[in-house]
Image: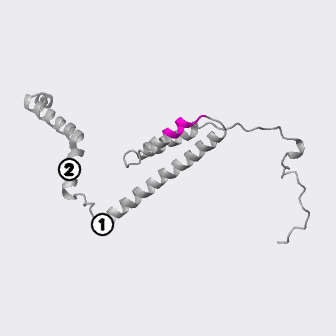
Amino acid sequence: MDLLLRLLERRVIIAGAAILAAVWIGGQWGGYAQGRADLMMHPPAPVSSPLADDIIKTSEARESAKLKGLHRTVSAEIAAAKANGFNVDKFQRLADNALGLDTPPYRSAAIERLNKLRLAIPQKKETFRPAAAEDMNPDLFDTPRPKGKAARR
């Protein structure tokens, strides 16, 4: 009973609340302090080396060539649709506008626009005919197996 009365004293309750608050604050903000300490101990390396610049330029050129190749493909599909008699002038303007977004921050949006535009290009319907019985592929599992002797073991 004496222990319970001692635990209900004001200083014990304040000390317990302070410990609980410290544990909660450490859980909430401890990762931030650890990240800042890690950043101070290991600062990021500068990216101004000539090799890094060369890698970045090569990567940008490759991504730009990929976008231009996709634009050529979409333009060819638009020209084929125009040859089939569809009115696709609007599609060509949209493709040219997407090519104008050939900068690093907008390149992924331009590729997405060209791919969506590629799906919207009208195409000529193909004519189909029902397959005749003689056009069917032979069933490979119904063919007779060659007879032979089993190898001795």
The answer for how far apart the CA atoms under marks 2 and 1 are is: 29 Å
**In the image, what residue type sits under mark 2?**
Arg
- Count neighbours of disc 1 (C-alpha within 10 A) and say few if under 14, some if 14 to 19, many if 20 or more: few
- x and y percent of residue 9 in the render? 9, 28
Q: From the viewer's perspective, is residue 55 above or below residue 130? A: below
- Does the magenta run of residues contain 67? no
Query: Residue 90 or 57: which is nearer the viewer?
Result: 90
Q: Which mark is residue 42?
A: none
Task: Give the quadrant of residue 126.
Answer: top right
Query: Label 2: which residue?
Result: 36
**Which color scheme did the rendering employ for the protein?**
one colour
- Residue with the mark numbered 1: 50
Query: Which quadrant holds residue 80?
Result: top right
Residue that lies at the very extreme toward the left in this rendered image: 11
Relative placement, left or right, of 146 versus 31 is right
Q: Check the picture and name the quadrant holding the C terminus.
A: bottom right
On screen, residue 74 above or below 63: above
Quarter assignment of residue 62: bottom left
Q: What are the residue bounds of the magenta stretch?
A: 87-93
Between circles 2 and 1, the one closer to the viewer is 1
Dot 2: element? helix
Nearest the eye: 47 or 39: 47
Q: Residue shown at 48%/51% (left/top)?
A: 68
Residue for point 65% across, 36% down: 85
Percent from the top left, x then y, of residue 98?
45, 42
Q: Position of residue 78 (x, y in %)?
A: 58, 42
